[in-house]
Amino acid sequence: MEAPLTPLRLAACEVTAEMFMADALPHWARHSDTPVDLVVHEDLFALGAADYDVLVTPRDCLPQGATGIEIGRIAVGLFGAPSYLADHPFSCGAEPLKGHLLIRASGSLARIAHYRWLEEQGGRTAMMSSSPLAQREACARGQGVALLPVGLAEGDPRLQRIEKFTFEDIPVWVLAGDRDASDPRVASFLRWARRHFVDRRPGRADR
């Protein structure tokens, strides 16, 4: 009887697991015999290098000491419940969110520039969470405004996008430590991810 193959430990957050890995991993399974152990964490930046083989994470840039590729981007917007927005108009001053209740990020999300911006806008913190799903639910219940992935929030009738604010998309990376990237399983996954995500983008030839 053959020994079971050692799974590739893939760490992702709720959003990257749902928006990127859910559709991609069936393609990986057809490409490779190496199984994936997908573990969802709320605070990816708190993980040590020994906790995963490959990390799928939103980040402003690729960190030093890591090998990886940008596999896509997450569009984000500022949202609020219609009832909340009706009761809390926005000012046009230097602090447009002054007096508003903010649903802020904690954990690894709080280190991304977009969420740091939200902290600086003069509002009052009503709640903090490392989970975009928990932020969405609090926002939908009128607890305040939240910066949310458009893919999670748009189309939810309980939420209204605040068009006054626009943001650049947040990069998403598949990465591994430089030392781990030499592992054949990790190197194979990174090569596959480049072909699957990057080379298939519009305007690039399939390889």
Image: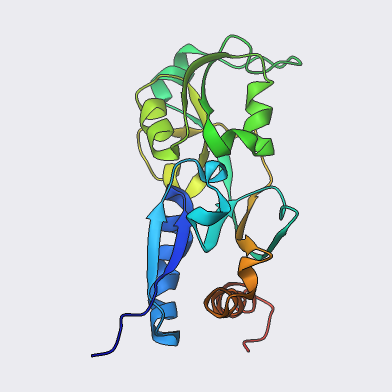
Residue 182 drawn at (x, y percent):
64, 75
Residue 83 placement: quadrant? top left
Residue 133 falls in image quadrant? top left
Residue 164 seen in the figure: no
Question: Residue at point 37% right, 41% down?
Answer: 156
Residue 99 coordinates in the image, percent (x, y)? 58, 9
Residue lying farthest top? 99
The quadrant of the rendering that contains the N terminus is bottom left
List x then y, in percent, for residue 134. Answer: 38, 33
* Direction from residue 82 to residue 195 in the image, left or right: right
Q: Nearer the viewer, residue 133 or 90?
A: 133
Front in this rendered view, residue 80 or 34:
34
Q: Which residue is at the front of the view, 13 or 95?
A: 13
Tell me, yes or no, if residue 94 can be seen here. Answer: yes
Residue 25 drawn above or below residue 70:
below
- Expressed as whole percent of the image width and height from the top left, the position of residue 40 reads 40, 51
Question: Colour scheme of this structure image?
Answer: rainbow
Tally of numbered tags: 0
| Quadrant the C terminus occupies | bottom right
Can you name the residue that lies furthest to the left here? 1
- Residue at (66%, 14%) from the top-left corner? 122
**Left or right: 89, with 144 as reference point:** right
Residue 49 lies left or right of residue 158; in this view the side is right
Q: Is residue 126 left or right of residue 140?
A: right
Q: Is residue 203 above or below residue 39?
A: below
